[in-house]
Amino acid sequence: MSLAPLNADEERLWRSLLRIVATLPRLLDEDLVRSTGVSLSEYVTLMNLSEAEDQEMRLTELALAAGLSLSRISRLVEDMRVRGLVTKRRAAADTRGFIATLTPAGLERLRDAYPTNLASARRRVLDHVAPRAVSGSGQVLAAIAEGMDDDSDDI
C-alpha cells in the first residue's frame, strides 16, 4: 500500500468521487420520491428482487446487493411487506434467516418507477459522460465496487 500523496489528477478524482458518493443517492432519492413515492432504497430492493432467481433473496444477500445494513433492510422489507410489495418468510434450511419475495404489486411499483429512475440516472450521471468513456468508466467503477465486496479492513 502506497502512502504517497495524491497528485493533482488523483486528488481531483478522489474529491469528486467523495462528492458523488455523498450527494448522488440523496438526489436520486428526491427524484424518485417526488415523482413516484418510491424511495431509492425501496427501488434498489425491488430491482434486486426482480432480477433474482424466483424473484426472492435472503435478507443478508439483499442487504449486500442493496448496499444497506442488515437491520436497515429488515426494517425496509417489513415496511414493504405491510404495503404488499414483498412477502417475507423464514428460510427453510436456516430458521434464523428470512427470505423476501417480490409480489406482483411490488413488480408493478418497480415498473412504474423505472422511467423516473432512468431519467434521473441519465440527467444526473450519464449525460455528463462521453459515450466513448462509458465502457471504461463502468469497468473502473465495477472494479472499485468489487474491491469493496472483499470486505477488507486493510488500511
Image (tube, helix red, strand yellow):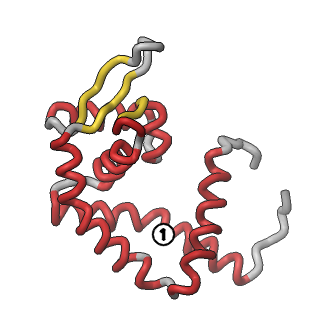
Work out which quarter of the rendered image holds the N terminus and state it.
bottom right
From the viewer's perspective, tell me whether residue 139 is left or right of residue 99: right
- What residue sits 24% from the left and 62% below the top? 32
Percent x, y of residue 72: 37, 37
**Mark 1 = which residue?**
20
Residue 134's quadrant in the figure? bottom right
Amino acid type, residue under disc 1 in the picture:
Ile
Q: Secondary structure at mark 1?
A: helix
From the viewer's perspective, tell me whether residue 41 is left or right of residue 2: left
Q: Is residue 25 above or below residue 129?
A: above
- What residue sits 30% from the left and 46% below the top? 46
- What residue sits 43% from the left and 43% below the top? 68
| Farthest residue, direction front | 54
Percent x, y of residue 3: 83, 62
Q: Is residue 30 above or below residue 57?
A: below
- What residue sits 49% from the left and 63% below the top? 21
How many C-alpha atoms fall within 10 Å of the one at disc 1: few (<14), some, or many (≥20)?
A: some
Residue 98's quadrant in the figure? top left
Query: 148 or 122: nearer the eye?
Result: 122
Percent x, y of residue 128: 45, 84
Percent x, y of residue 4: 84, 68
Q: Is residue 149 above or below residue 28?
A: above
Query: 68 or 108: nearer the eye?
Result: 108
Looking at the rendered structure, the number of numbered marks drawn on it comes to: 1
Residue 99's quadrant in the figure? top left
